[in-house]
Image (cartoon, rainbow, N blue to C red):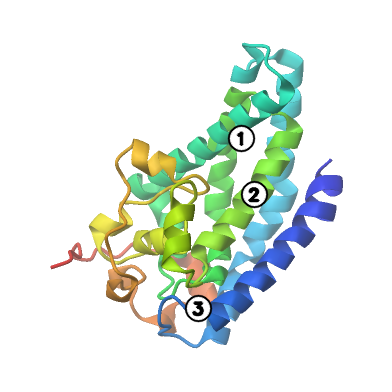
Amino acid sequence: MIHAIFDKIGAPALTVIFVLLFLLETKFRLRKRIQNRWRRIIVNLLASIPSFGLLRFIFLPAMVWLAYKNETIHVGLNYLYALPSFIEAAIAFVLLDYGNYLWHVLNHKIPLLWRFHLVHHTDPDLDITTAFRFHFGEMIGSVFFRGAVVFLTGATPLTVLIYEIVFEAATQFHHSNWKLLIQLEKALNKIFVTPRMHGIHHSVVQQETDSNYSVIFSCWDRLHKTMRLNVKQDDITIGVAPYNNPAELTMGYLLKLPFTKIRKGKPTARP
């Protein structure tokens, strides 16, 4: 199933989305760059190779296996009621996304998890390549939490794979440096996470970093009052204050970063 759905359909679709967003953010740039674009592309993509391998050969098989297992023992939420299959799939899809909201919050609040998620946030620019800049340690940790969410929701293997494809597409979209028409973005943001919304989350200002955790649906931030939209993109400095030297953020440094002494900087606040 992974080969038939993710490899043959999902991966090509995600590749097309990447190319389109890459071209759109080239033509319609939202935020000014402070680094050489091609150097960042090389660093981010090379640093992401271990995570890509874990995603395909450990994470996805684990999620699908748990979903298959649940079809045998019927523990998950979707086995507590009998609804049309498409409604059960929709419920599981939404709950999987809520689980990712919670996982993202934990990555910011628990010091051990932050060590690995920090790699993602140290990027001094924010564009579509940042969507792949995740440490493999974070991917390993997500297997346990997100696996528990899959199991507890009772999501089917098909729903799990469809969600993962949409999840990856949404991650590319909201990390992109694409300047959508503001009216269009405001309309989309009523339901989905958008580039301006997620750009605020990557700010060096602590109150802004501690906001906008949602991945696909923006409602989770509204529900938990972690939504923040009133920040102009030109006023945002992307990154993490103690790691503001792009020259040191090489592929090798990013891979070893979680295992080093994490720098403590003075919390940044907006005047």
For residue 239, above or below residue 75: below
**In the drawing, what numbered circle is on residue 93?**
1
Decide which of tag 1 and tag 2 comes sooner along the chain. 1
Give the residue pinned by disc 2. Answer: 166
Q: Where is residue 119 in the image (x, y as percent from the top left)?
A: 46, 63
Crowding around mark 1 (Cα neighbors within 10 Å: few <14, some 14 to 19, many 20+) is: many
In three-dimensional space, the C-alpha distance between marks 1 and 3, rounded to whole angstroms, equals 36 Å
* Residue most extreme to the left: 271
Q: Position of residue 195 (x, y in %)?
A: 46, 63
* Residue most extreme to the bottom: 36
Please identify the quarter of the rendering in which residue 151 is found. Answer: top right
Q: Is residue 78 left or right of residue 244?
A: right
* Residue plotted at (76% across, 27% down): 68
Mark 1 and mark 2 residues within 8 Å of each other at the beta carbon:
yes
* Residue plotted at (36% across, 36% down): 223
For residue 97, above or below residue 118: above
Residue flagged by tag 3: what amino acid is it? Answer: Thr
Q: Position of residue 44 (x, y in %)?
A: 56, 72
Query: In what quadrant of the picture does the N terminus appear?
Result: top right
Q: Can residue 138 be seen in this view?
A: yes
* Residue plotted at (47% across, 72% down): 179
Residue flagged by tag 1: what amino acid is it? Answer: Phe
For residue 231, above or below residue 234: above
Decide which of tag 2 and tag 3 comes sooner along the chain. 2
Mark 2 and mark 3 residues within 8 Å of each other at the beta carbon:
no
Of circles 2 and 3, the one toward us is 2
Please identify the quarter of the rendering in which residue 110 is found. Answer: top left
**In the drawing, what numbered circle is on residue 250?**
3
Query: In what quadrant of the picture does the C terminus appear?
Result: bottom left
